[in-house]
Image (spheres, rainbow, N blue to C red):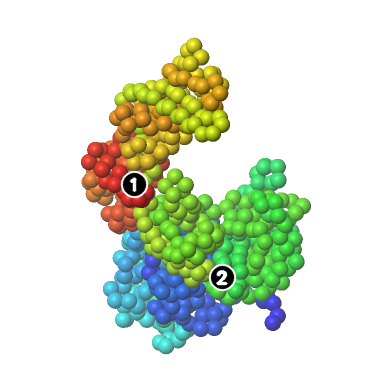
Amino acid sequence: MAAAKSFRTEQIRNVVVLGHGGSGKTTLIDAVCFAAGTSNRKGSVGAGTALTMTTPEETGHGMSMQLTVAHAIREGTKVNLLDTPGYMDFVGDATAAARVADAALVTASATSGVEVGTEMVWQLCDDRALPRMIFVSMMDKMHANFGKVLNEVREKLAPGAIPVQIPIGAASTFKGVVNLLTNNAYAYKAGSTTGEYEEIPIPDEVADDVENWQTELMETLATTDEELLDRYLEGEEISLEEQLAALAGAVAEGEVVPVFCGAAEQSFGVRELTEMMVALLPHPGQAGEVEATNGGGDPVQLRAADDESVSALVFKTTAEPHVGELSLFRVYSGMIVNGTELRNVSRNASERINHLAIPQARERVDVDGLHAGDIGVVAKLKSTHTNDTLSAPTNPVTIEGVVFPQPDISIAVRGAARSDEDKLGEALGKLHEEDPTFAAGFNPEIRQTIARGMGELHLDVQFERMKRKYGVSVETEPPRIAYRETITAEAQGQGRFKKQTGGRGQFGDCWVRLRPRDRGEGYEFISSIKGGVIPTKYVPSVGRGIEEAAAKGVVAGYPVVDFEAECYDGSYHSVDSSDIAFKVAGSYAFRNVAEKAKPALLEPILEITVTVPEEYLGDVMGDLNGRSARVLGMEPLGGKTAIMAQVAEAELYKYASVLRSITQGRGYHRRKLLGYDLVPPMRVEKIVAEAAEREG
C-alpha cells in the first residue's frame, strides 16, 4: 500500500478536544472524521464503536479513558484531533494532550452547560495559553438551550465568548444553523451521516437574534484593528476574508472565543466546525517557538520549520499484546523521514525511526515523512519513553515534558495467586510507563505493594488493563500505616549474654539507661563507662545491638524512635567476650528496659492543603473536624479557599474520593509528612491487635 501524503506545517492544525465527561467529545470526533472521509464508518459511543474508543475498558465503561489521536482532512489541511477523557480520574492524558496541541476545542452539552469538568479543562487551556473555540453539542437533545449555555460560558469561562453560529430550533425542532459571518442559514438534510446541508432563508423566529449577535460580532472584530474599526464606523463593507483574518487574530491572542453549535450524533454542524478550525486556529508555525535546552544546558528556541534541526517529544506511550510499544510524538522542529537516526539525550541512546505513521485512533497510516509540527506514531522504539525528547545527533536538545499531576489515592495490592505475585512488579511498571499518573512500588516498612492513582475508578481500570494485557490479577486492601514507637519515661536495666559450649564461650554484660528525646530527634547512644569495666573496643557493639533491637518495638513491633541509650556499667571476660557477645547483650538490655520505660505508639501526622470553592467551605471544614484535624489557617485564592491543616494519616484513607464527593469534583488536596505524634489511647488496642494478627 502506498504511503499517505505528508502535510506541510501550514497545512496542519493540532487541536485538543476537551470537555466534561459525557459532553460529546468522542462522538464529535467520530462524526468529523467520518464526514471528512478519513474514517470509513460512523460509530457510536453507546455501542462502543466510536472511532477513538479503542480499548475494551473504554467500551465496557462507555467512556473515553485515554488520549487518542485521530485526524480529519478538510480543504487540503490535516486537523489532528486529540480526544481526551472527560472524567477527572484520567486527567493525566488530558494534560498530555494539552501540552502538545496548538489550540483547543472545548465541548459543552446543550443540556448540561458548563460543568465541573468544563471548568477544570478550561484551566488546562489557561495554563498553556491555548487559543480555543467552543462547540455547544447535543442541540438535538431534550432541554437543549443554546442561550443558557452561552450565558454560562461568558459568566464562568470566557467573557470574550461570542457566537459565530446560532441554532435554528432546539431539541426535536433543531434543524440547522445561521452563520453570522456569512449571514447564511443552513438546514441539515435528515438522514445524512456526513452533515450535508442546504442553504435556506433566515427563519423569522431567529431574525432578531441574528441581527443582535451579528452586530456584536462585527463590533468585536472591528475593534481588533484600527483600520477595520474606521471602515466599520463609516459603514463600509468588510469582506468575509477580512472578517476571518480578524477573528483568527483575536482567537490567537485569546481575546475572543468563538462559539459554534450542532448535533454530532446526526453529524449536524461537523463540516462547518472543521472548516472553522482550519480557518481560525493557528498552524504550528504560527503557534510560537518552543523552549528547550541544548547539550550544554542552555535554553534554545525551537521553530516549527522543516529547515531546522530535528526535535520531537514523545507524549504518550501505549503497549498492546502482539503489537508492542507504540510511541506518539509531536515534531517540534525539522522534518523526520523513514530511516532517520535520532538521539535520546536523557537515556543516552540512539533510535532509528522506521515505519513512520500518522495515527487514526487504533489504526496507523504509513507516511514517508513528517513535517515540522505534525503528530506521528512509531512502533518499538528500544529505549524511549513518555516525556523523552528525540533530536538530531549533531544538535541534541531536551524539550520540557508533560507535567503530570501527582496521584493522590493509594491502595495496597498483592497478586491474587503465586503466579500473579511473580509477575506483579513488571506489570505495574509497564502500566506506569503508559500512564505516569499511575505509580506503584513495594514499601518494605509496611511490607505492602502500594499502587497510587488519581481516583478509585482510575485504579480499578488500571487493574482491569493489567489483567487483560499482562494476565496479572490482583487483590486489594487498605494500605497499612507506618506507625512508630517511643518511650515516655526513663528506665534502666541489664542485658547479659552468656553462652558456654565446648571450647571458647561468649560473654557480654552491660547496664543501660534509656531516656526519651524530643519528637524528631532520633536515636543517640552515649557511653559513660569508667574504669574499663567494658573494654572500649566493645562499647560501640552495645550501641549497635540496641539500635538493631529498636527496629522492632515492644508495643506492636514498630520501630522505636526518639530515645537516648546510655551504657553506664557492665563486665567482661578476658577470653570469652567479643563484639558479637556485647551486641547481643545490648539487644537484651533494650528489650528489658524498654518495657519499663512506658513505651507508646506514634502515628504519622500529615500536613494537608485542601483547596475548595468557597461555597463548599463549611461542608469541608465539618468533614475535617470529624477527622480530628487541626486547622492551621485559610487563604483565599480567587473564588477558592486553601485550608491548611494537620491530620493523622489514619484519618485520610479514601479522603480524595470523599472530598470529590463533597465538592462535586471541584476540590483537591495535597499532603506531605509533617512528623509523628502519640496515638490517642482509645485506638492503641486496635492497632496492637492488628499487628499481632499479622504476625500470628
Q: Nearer the viewer, residue 184 or 293?
A: 293
> Residue at 46% across / 16% down in the picture?
528
Element at label 1: helix
Is 246 left or right of 57, judged from the image as shown?
A: right
Where is residue 178? Give x, y as percent.
41, 75
Q: Nearer the viewer, residue 688 or 33?
A: 688
Q: Is residue 640 visible?
A: no
Residue occupying the far front of the picture? 502
> Which amino acid does the dot numbered 1 rest on?
Ala
Q: What residue did someone put label 2 on? A: 320
Q: Nearer the viewer, residue 425 or 282?
A: 425
Where is residue 70? Give x, y as percent.
55, 71
Q: Nearer the viewer, residue 264 or 413?
A: 413
Where is residue 25? Give x, y as percent.
44, 70
Q: What residue did someone put label 1 on? A: 691
Total count of labels: 2
